[in-house]
Image (cartoon, rainbow, N blue to C red):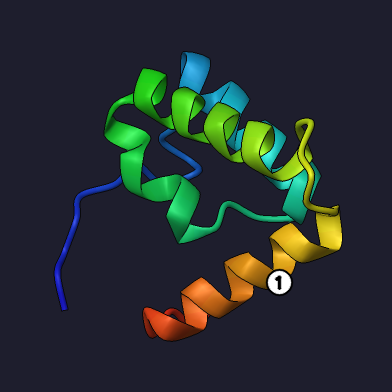
Amino acid sequence: MAWIETISDAAAEGPLRQLFDAAHRRAGRVFNIVRVPSLNPPVLKAGIGLYQAVMFGSSDLSRAQRELLAVVVSKTNGCHY
């Protein structure tokens, strides 16, 4: 398994602290998919923005259909989340 250096919750400061705090409010914790780009907070912020646009933005697909697609892709890729 690959190892990627990340920043812990306790060490997060500034904009990263704000992004981690928002993750805690949304999900009760910072999932690894959010933590991986923690060394580059602007990239993390952009990734969260992309996710929110895809999952919550205007679309011909319902929210349930988008979630279903995400689950199928994750399962196909062997992701456990």
Mark 1 neighbour class, 10 Å CA radius: few under 14, some 14 to 19, many 20 or more = few
Q: Residue at x 54, y 32 (%)?
A: 50
Q: Quadrant of the N terminus?
A: bottom left
Q: Residue at x 79, y 44 (%)?
A: 60
Q: How many marks?
A: 1
Q: Position of residue 10 (x, y in %)?
A: 48, 41
Q: Residue furthest top?
A: 14
Q: Which residue is mark 1?
A: 68
**Quarter of the image holding residue 29?**
bottom right
Q: Is residue 64 left or right of residue 40?
A: right
Residue 53 vertical position relative to residue 25 in the rendered view, above or below: above
Q: Quadrant of the C terminus?
A: bottom right
Q: Is residue 64 left or right of residue 34?
A: right
- Of 56 and 5, nearer the camera is 56
Q: Residue at x 78, y 45 (%)?
A: 26
Q: Position of residue 8 (x, y in %)?
A: 41, 46
Q: Is residue 24 left or right of residue 33?
A: right
Q: SS class of the residue under badge 1? A: helix
Residue 21 vertical position relative to residue 3 in the rendered view, above or below: above
Q: Residue furthest left?
A: 2
Q: Is residue 30 left or right of residue 61?
A: left
Q: Position of residue 25 (x, y in %)?
A: 79, 42
Q: Residue at x 78, y 52 (%)?
A: 61
Q: Position of residue 34 (x, y in %)?
A: 48, 47
Residue 22 vertical position relative to residue 71 in the rendered view, above or below: above
- Of 48 and 70, nearer the camera is 70
Q: Amino acid at mark 1?
A: Leu
